Amino acid sequence: MNGISILLKMAIGFITSKVIAVFVGPSGMALVGNLRNFLTTTEAFATLGFENGVVKYVAEHKQEEEKLKQTLSTIFLSVLLVCVLLSLGLFLFSDYFNSSIFGVAYQYAFLFKALAIALPFYIGNIFLIATINGFGEYKKVIYINSIGSCIGLIVSVLLILNLKTEGALLAIILTPSLLFFVSILFINKEIAILKAVHLKFYNLKFLKNLSFYSLMVLVSAVFGPMVLLAIRKNIILNLGIEQAGFWEAMTRISSYYFLFITSLIGIYFLPKLAIAKDNQETKSLFWEYYKGILPLFMVGMIGIYFFRDFIIQVLFTKQFLPVSKLFFWQLIGDTFKAASFILGYQFYAKKLTKAFIFFELFSLSILYFSSSYFVSQFGLEGIVMAHATTFFIYLISLCYYFRKSLFY
């Protein structure tokens, strides 16, 4: 089911990418990348980084009604307050965010006002899907994601055809917000969410437990996009905005095939890692992934490399063919990244906050400095060389850190 869902997402993503490539071009693709990075940070602040915590604690307390209500109420009401404050800030300071993210040459302040209105629904959807995932209802999560992909296609195509670049940017904001209304239908079959969430169930002790997840997600979601924005600005400054658009196209292709890994780990492995009682259970899950999932992913990488020119022309246009030279190092890096993903999720599953922050800042530092060096030496190809270098070092480091769960 997950495989079918991923194929659907990829097919829809391909169509959306093609429409963006034809009507927006490489320069517009670079702007889309900047907005995506900004949304990653905004999402992390708005959710307080609680998403993986929701999965863990709902999975643990789904049979204990009182604790479940405390968990849901504490998270929902805290997130609601932060969402309102963030929405107010986005609306009032839309001009500032426009110049910071896109530059003074672009007048997209209206996007941040639209985001201010859509944000509560956007974050509500994330909260609801995480809750359903915590109940172990994998099929429902897959159904919601599939429906969301279809809604995203319709909204994106209509907006891009009518508004070009502005439409592509607006679609990124609106699509997840619309999915809230689908998620609310599915969650009501598991729990009466409006009855479960109430101020009387609010428990400050749960906030302390969840704060570990906040620190992890916020560090990743603040520093990660900051580094990517800095790298993209460096590419625009030294190589031009079209080159930045080519890198964004490569990143977009990578995100499509990575859906297979991220969704499977998030939906299937994370809840199981969260309730694993000892190293033997954890080791069993790790090797289930390495023996069953990673080899399939690597076979897919080989196929993608040999069909890269065809993929580029199907997804984008001939104008994007320079992206072809980025595939080799991107695929090498993505293989290392896929191998490290299951280990990285152990930080969330076991609340290893300090270790996560160290490894996250360590890897981002490597990416930033190696990209600056490699881009100056090898041009645009240097950014994917830096990507491969970063995740090779990251994987080796995680294997050493989790050696007891992997090998003993």
Image: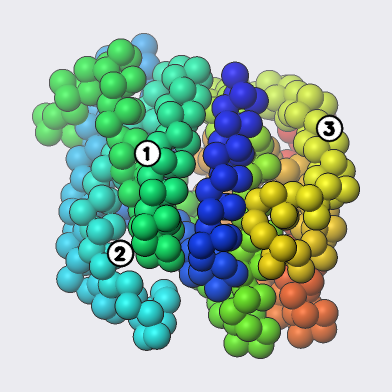
Q: Residue at x 26, y 78 (%)?
A: 95
The residue to which callout 1 is attached is 126
Residue 232 location, x and y as percent?
59, 75
Q: In the rendering, which numbered label is found on residue 111?
A: 2
Foreground mark, 1 or 2, reads: 2
Mark 3 to mark 2: distance in Å?
41 Å
Q: Residue at x 57, y 27 (%)?
A: 5
Residue 39 to residue 124: above or below: below
- Does residue 198 show up? yes
For disc 1, the neighbor class at 10 Å (few under 14, some 14 to 19, many from 20) is some
Q: Which structural element holds mark 1? A: helix
- Does residue 204 show up? no
Residue 2 to residue 309: above or below: above
Mark 1 to mark 3: distance in Å?
30 Å
Mark 1 to mark 2: distance in Å?
20 Å
Question: Mark 2 belongs to which amino acid?
Answer: Leu
Q: Residue at x 37, y 27 (%)?
A: 131
Snapshot quadrant of residue 209: top left
Q: Nearer the viewer, residue 212 or 217?
A: 217
Q: In the rendering, which numbered label is found on residue 295?
A: 3
Foreground mark, 3 or 2, reads: 2
Q: In the rendering, which numbered label is found on residue 245?
A: none
Q: Residue at x 26, y 67 (%)?
A: 110
Residue 391 to residue 124: above or below: below
For the N terminus, the quadrant is: top right
For disc 3, the neighbor class at 10 Å (few under 14, some 14 to 19, many from 20) is some
Q: Which structural element holds mark 2? A: helix
Question: Which is more N-terminal, label 2 or label 1?
Answer: 2
Q: Nearer the viewer, residue 322 or 399?
A: 322
